[in-house]
Amino acid sequence: MVKLQNRVVESFLDAPGPEIVAALLYGEDSGLVRERAARLAGAVVEDVSDPFRVAEVSQAMLKDDPSRLFDEMAAMSLTGGRRLVRLSPAGNAQSAAIQTVLDDSSITPDGSFLVVEAGSLAPRDSLRKLFESHQRGAAIPCYLDDDRSLEALIHQAMSGHGLTVEPSALAYLCENLGSDRQITRSELEKLALFKGRNGGAVTLAEAEANVGDGAPLARDDVALATASGDQGALDRALVKCNIAGEQPIAILRAVIRHLQRLHLISLKAAMGDDIGRLIKSHRPPIFFKHQAIMQRQIQMWRPQRLAQALAILTEAELDCKTTGLPAEAICGRALIRIANAAQPKQRG
């Protein structure tokens, strides 16, 4: 089966296809991987803590006993109903054991269902290729929230508590959430509980007081410093990201999102629109404290140069996933290249 597209993921999580015996959930957003894995598990068994119907398998178990996964999948439920087998975390080293399960016709869809959780996987990784190509497997990517999906998630979470969000608060939340779906939901739930169930709109002050642990702000600082060509600020921001435990791919994604905004606005400005008006009307809204610096950055960068910078970042992200080289070094080199290109002597 091919990689599931977003439009069918939701329905699959609630009711996996009758021909599927295993699903792989993978991607940069580990929180979304866990969230979707839990939802899929709940669709297979009513009680995910039932020891008679649920088995947990680890990499260490398979290293000691390679047939353990097949044995768990072939076992019958003592209390009736389907069995759930969970493998987490998984990598390419487990591909052979999983393929044995997928290939064996004695493992039937009405027997056991395998839920596999993994981190980032490149298209050529054997685990991802196995699930994308096998007719009895399904691959579900879990990417970081982009601006549009994050804004929708914020509105959904707040509306569930009878709340709305002021534009300035929405801009702040979009800037400071999104690197992990579970953390995002937890932060939004905390904000909603603080606001209470009396209705009304969440203000910027309330959002600032309740959301943010420093890591998102550090990523913002990296993005702003990179696009401004400020090497000193970039170095300091990267140190903060390192202290906060930020992953290189998450940092690259933050800079990509920032440059994508600049690119979109610069294209419209090139057609004669006012930059200030474009920034103020951008959706999702841009945090007001960042609007002035973004206006200066758009004046520094031409659309073509921004497109080239985005290509550098995209290539760096791919290299982080596929080359085996230190991701921190790949990320740092890409950001320095772009920051150098933003300096006055190299503008054009």
Image (cartoon, rainbow, N blue to C red):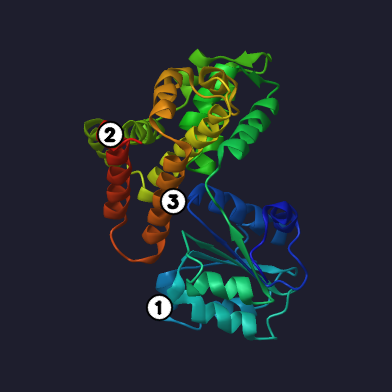
| Corner quadrant of residue 76 | bottom right
Distance, label 2 to label 1, CA atoms, is: 52 Å
Looking at the image, the residue that sits furthest to the right is: 18
Query: Which residue corresponds to mark 1?
Result: 63
Locate the N terminus and report the quarter of the image it occupies.
bottom right
* Cα distance between the residues tagged 1 and 3: 40 Å
Q: According to the image, label 2 marks what residue?
A: 343
3D distance between C-alphas at marks 2 and 3 = 19 Å
Residue type indicated by callout 1: Lys
> Where in the figure is residue 273, as x and y percent of width and height?
58, 23
Could you tell me if the residues under marks 1 and 3 are in contact, i.e. CB atoms within 8 Å?
no
Q: Amino acid at mark 3?
A: Ala
Q: Are marks 2 and 3 in contact (CB under 8 Å)?
A: no
Is residue 239 found left or right of 280 in the rendered image? left
Q: Nearer the viewer, mark 2 or mark 1?
A: 2
Q: Can residue 45 be seen in this snapshot? A: no
The numbered mark, 2 or 3, whose residue comes first in the sequence reads: 3
Which percent across, then down, holds residue 108?
72, 79
Kind of residue sitting beneath label 2: Gln
Mark 2 vs mark 3: in front: 2
